[in-house]
Amino acid sequence: MMETKRITSKEIISHLVEKFPACFSIEGKVKPLKIGIFQELATELENDEKVSKTQLRQALRHYTSSWRYLKSIKVGNHRVNLAGEDAELIDQEQADFAAKTLKESQDKFANKKTQDKKENKSYKGTKAGDKGSTVTSKAKPKVGKAKKMPAKPKVKLTKVEANSLTKGMNVMVQVGNSPLDATITEVAGKDVSVQLTSGMVVKTQADKIFTK
């Protein structure tokens, strides 16, 4: 019996680079994607047997959450469409959100490396223990800064009725402990796809959608 090889997000991104080289890239400079680009891609790739909507959404999430992509979200930079043409400008709020997301990701990575080093050194006696304490002291400021992140839950939110959700609607979406600004890109019953100001596409439920 033949096994069907599951296509990975990296392979889908490579496929997108081939089809839309003016928009996507694997190496070098990254161009921020326009808001709502998921819908354009879904339409363009409707008859493409390589990529399903679910796989496309996952690949876009992978692409837009990379450090390389988040570093491209700067005030005054243009987002681009599939043809690589300038779309909307990135504003301060979008740039701040991307910078915050990048820092959280980098801190998480740094803390994981620190933890791995501590675990490795715990088997190497007193000398290694002394080194371990130095690493721990360096890591403390990162942990302290990370605690400042969940500031937005204090915003007073109003839950939106599921039947009033429409494509293109500007909303707040609950992601973890923080409500984030987003634009609805697709509504399928209780399943709602939104694009965050960073360009990241997220699939959520209607009961996680709010307005200020």
Image (tube, rainbow, N blue to C red):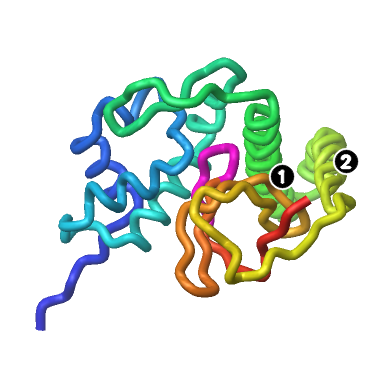
The relative height of residue 45 versus residue 77 in the rendered view (above or below) is below
The residue under the point 50% across, 39% down is: 66
Image coordinates of residue 58 in percent, x first then y, are: 42, 56
Residue 101's quadrant in the figure?
A: top right
Q: Is residue 67 magenta?
A: no
Horizontal relation, residue 53 to residue 51: left or right: right
Residue 34 place in picture, x, y as percent = 44, 34
Q: Which of these two is toward me, 144 or 194?
A: 194
Q: Is residue 79 above or below residue 12?
A: above
Place residue 28 in its image quadrant: top left
Q: In this view, does 110 lie to the left or right of 129?
A: left
Q: Any mark on residue 111, and which?
A: 1
> 55 or 204: which is nearer to us?
204
Question: First in sequence: mark 1 or mark 2?
Answer: 1
Residue 104 at what x, y percent from top left?
69, 41
Q: Is residue 126 visible?
A: no
Instruction: Specify start and end residues of the magenta stretch as a single range.
Output: 196-202
Between 77 and 11, the one nearer to me in the picture: 77
SS type, badge 2: helix
Q: Which of marks 1 and 2 is in front?
A: 2
Counting from the top left corner in percent of width and height, residue 38 is at 39, 48
At label 2, counting other C-alpha atoms closer than 10 Å, the crowd grade (few under 14, some 14-19, many 20 or more) is: few
Residue type at the position of mark 1 = Asn
Q: Residue 144 carries which label?
A: 2
